[in-house]
Amino acid sequence: MHRHCAVITAILATFCGLAAAQEQQLQWRGVWEWSMDHRTEAGLTAMADAAADLGFNVIMCSPPHGKLAFMREQCHARGIKLYLSTIYSHSDAATRQMMTAEQLASRPDEPVLGYQYGGEPLDDVEVFQGELPCWNQPAVREQARERTAAYARLPIDGLALDGIGYINYLRCHCPVCEEQLASFRAKHPRMGLRRSEELFAEETLVEFINEMAATAREANPEIELTIHIWPWYRPNPYYGHRLDLDTAGETVAWFFRPHWPLDKVQRRADWLVAHQQDDYPDHLAAPFIGFDARSTLHARSPKRVREELNLVIASGASAIQVADLGYIMDRPTVAEIFREVLGGRATNDAP
Ligand SMILES: [Zn+2]
């Protein structure tokens, strides 16, 4: 009897040790939520329960601001941090991004088959279906700084930036950007037209995001910061290591078909982790896995999702980003994979 107990204890210790080791590696496990009820207290409690159940310790969502204190309490009781999803949507037509006439003409009225919704496009002509503000316009920056500072003072643990990119996946063609690009080119006379355009556009994104990070930290030095880099930036999609954020989510597996081959998942996760501290010593890459269960066409199998998660772990990543919590909960067989790989409720530390 005693012998049996000792054996069982040893097995349990080994199992728990392995689970703990795995949990230590993925210190930061963030999940985006946009498909559940985040308006009511019952809905928010269910969201916090779901995130804890699957083993996440950060939830990125946007409840009404009046419910944030309640939600943070719910999250903390389950060992989870609350990040406010932050999108700089902008309704003023005068400061929106502009495309070339050719790009505008090629944009279909409705998403066409194979449209990737801001993920890596399948061809060279796809453009984004929505509108985005121009990141170089002074009025946009001013409004974004004000919003960032105000958000950083809310009862939350972090900000999760999203939607910072270009509608043509390359750059903005508004008069302000054209003028700034011209002076950038004047400073780099030997640089080719294509290269200068790409570098200028990437600098714009990096500067904008880092300016918002500085603004958030000035308003609240304790605030934690992450991003999901989206829409796709065609010339250099993986620039997250250049961002002065605690973590940067960059896609290694996208929501929609054609699902990315596993060797692509592996190469991209490995690259992100290898370069995560190129610019900032404490920065962590958070390989991003998007999962969509709304149609059987796009949903991936539990086996496939497990392989993707294992590849992220094998890359040596200390952080992971996943979307969307509600879609995963809609597929119990896939939810079970997350629970197993991320450790589930039992491993979340109490505050
Ligand atoms: Zn512009």
Image (cartoon, rainbow, N blue to C red):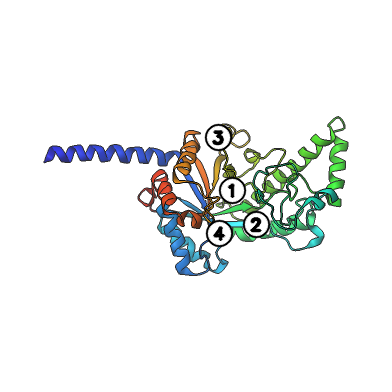
Q: CA distance from mark 2 to mark 4?
A: 13 Å
Say whether residue 126 is visible.
Answer: yes
Image: 62 above or below 273: below
Tag shown at residue 87: 2
Q: Tell me the crowding category of disc 4: few under 14, some 14 to 19, or many 20 or more residues within 10 angstroms, Cα based.
A: some
Specify which label sits upstream in the sequence, 3 or 2.
Answer: 2
Q: CA distance from mark 3 to mark 1?
A: 24 Å
* Rendered location of residue 22, percent (x, y): 40, 39
Q: Tell me the crowding category of disc 3: few under 14, some 14 to 19, or many 20 or more residues within 10 angstroms, Cα based.
A: many
Q: Which residue is mark 1?
A: 256
Q: Amino acid at mark 4?
A: Trp
Specify which label sits upstream in the sequence, 4 or 1.
Answer: 4
Q: Amino acid at mark 3?
A: Val
The answer to which of 248 and 315 lies nearer the viewer is 315
Q: Are marks 3 and 2 in contact (CB under 8 Å)?
A: no
Specify which label sits upstream in the sequence, 3 or 1.
Answer: 1
Q: Quadrant of residue 259?
A: top right
Q: Are marks 2 and 1 in contact (CB under 8 Å)?
A: no
* Rendered location of residue 313, percent (x, y): 47, 37
Mark 4 or 1: in front is 1
* Rendered location of residue 100, percent (x, y): 84, 49
Residue depicted at 55% across the width and 50% down the height: 298
Q: Which residue is mark 3?
A: 273
Label 2 sits on a secondary structure element that is strand
Residue depicted at 58% across the width and 49% down the height: 225
